[in-house]
Image (cartoon, rainbow, N blue to C red):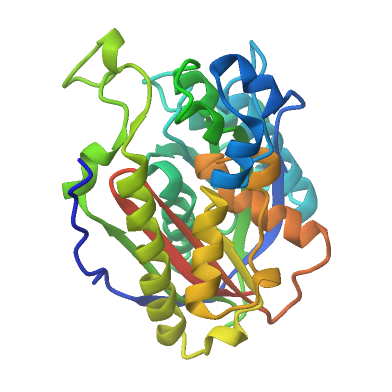
């Protein structure tokens, strides 16, 4: 699998203004799993930090599911936006770790929150939140929704082999959410792009559980060609970020905050160095949470906003990348 050769990233750039984020929320379980806690796997704590930047991650306790985490994150976003359940007219949940294969976990969240609206799951792994955000934007911009709830949530600890010391330490559980609403003509996506390259399907995924291979204990857990995915991600971030900023008619130094998917600190460092951006503008929480997949970007957004760092008129670059291979990036004017 490591001989994968990524094509040039030619996914089209689009613009969609008149949409704003009016509330954010996030949730991570209380259960902290440190690198020292993984010593039984034969993992060296210092090695994990050096290779990934991760010091600890959160694991959902027994009885807590993706839908449960998504519900809390959504409640916090709704409270921040000051909206009632009756105000929400669309719910999109990005996840690749649903509570059940059927029905959609979004319907559980809808019921938990007392919403009266359509609810659907969207599966694009670590790119999921950007795919869901872009989908929600279309509904709001066209008048199909006045208040769209977009959530990214994954319970990665349930789909990882606890004896696999190459993958198990990398991931954590968490959820993030935003409320989308109509905005001014100056607000929204100055540029956005979604892309995929199915020729890299086998680099990262779970082979068993679908109709192709309903159940195979040998391939039940997530599998990843880490080296190939790392090389692809480093190249992807630089190229797509440059093109997105250019399409937004901005310069790289006009991006106030870089909210990149939290997969590996070396990916974040490589992106900052290759793009020549201030590392302080690149938000990082993976040292505390690990890779939370679809929860990654919205958690970063929520924590940065609640810290008072995001101001009206600022520019954010949000980018997700992962299994599929898929990616999604937007340059957003707050």
**The N terminus - image quarter:** top left
The reply, left or right, for residue 115 in relation to residue 248 is right
Compared with 130, 270 (above or below) is: below
Q: Name the foreground residue: 90 vs 59.
A: 59
The reply, left or right, for residue 328 in relation to residue 289 is left
**The C terminus - image quarter:** bottom right
Q: Residue at x 46, y 36 (%)?
A: 95
- Residue 243 drawn at (x, y percent): 38, 79
Q: Name the foreground residue: 38 vs 115.
A: 38
Compared with 314, 284 (above or below) is: above
- Residue 122 drawn at (x, y percent): 40, 41
User: Is residue 258 visible in the rendered structure shown here?
Assistant: yes
- Residue 280 drawn at (x, y percent): 71, 70
The reply, left or right, for residue 18 in relation to residue 128 is right
Q: Going by the picture, which residue comes out furthest to the right? A: 308
Q: Name the foreground residue: 76 vs 143.
A: 76
Q: Residue at x 80, y 57 (%)?
A: 306
Compared with 199, 283 (above or below) is: below
Q: Name the foreground residue: 20 vs 261.
A: 261
């Amino acid at each position: 699998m490591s001989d994968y050769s990524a094509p040039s990233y030619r996914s089209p750039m689009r613009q969609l203004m008149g949409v704003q984020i009016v509330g954010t929320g996030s949730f991570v379980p209380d259960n902290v799993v440190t690198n020292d806690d993984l010593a039984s796997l034969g993992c060296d704590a210092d090695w994990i930090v050096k290779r990934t930047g991760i010091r600890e991650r959160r694991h959902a306790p027994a009885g807590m599911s993706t839908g449960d985490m998504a519900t809390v994150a959504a409640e916090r976003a709704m409270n921040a936006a000051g909206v009632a359940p009756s105000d929400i007219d669309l719910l999109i949940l990005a996840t690749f770790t649903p509570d059940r294969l059927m029905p959609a976990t979004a319907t559980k969240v809808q019921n938990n929150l007392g919403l009266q609206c359509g609810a659907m799951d969207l599966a694009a792994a670590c790119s999921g939140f950007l795919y869901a955000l872009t989908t929600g934007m279309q509904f709001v911009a066209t008048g199909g929704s006045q208040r769209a709830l977009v959530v990214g949530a994954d319970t990665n600890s349930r789909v990882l082999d606890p004896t696999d010391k190459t993958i198990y330490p990398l991931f954590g559980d968490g959820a993030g959410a935003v409320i989308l609403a109509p905005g001014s003509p100056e607000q929204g996506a100055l540029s956005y792009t979604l892309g995929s390259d199915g020729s890299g399907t086998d680099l990262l995924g779970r082979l068993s559980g679908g109709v192709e291979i309903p159940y195979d204990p040998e391939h039940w857990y997530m599998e990843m060609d880490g080296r190939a995915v790392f090389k692809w991600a480093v190249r992807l971030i630089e190229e797509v970020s440059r093109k997105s900023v250019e399409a937004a008619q901005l310069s790289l130094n006009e991006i106030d905050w870089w909210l990149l998917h939290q997969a590996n600190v070396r990916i974040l460092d490589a992106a900052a160095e290759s793009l020549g951006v201030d590392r302080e503008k690149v938000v990082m929480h993976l040292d505390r949470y690990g890779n939370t997949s679809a929860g990654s970007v919205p958690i970063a957004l929520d924590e940065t906003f609640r810290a008072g760092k995001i101001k009206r008129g600022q520019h954010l670059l949000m980018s997700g990348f992962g299994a599929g291979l898929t990616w999604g990036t937007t340059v957003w004017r707050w």
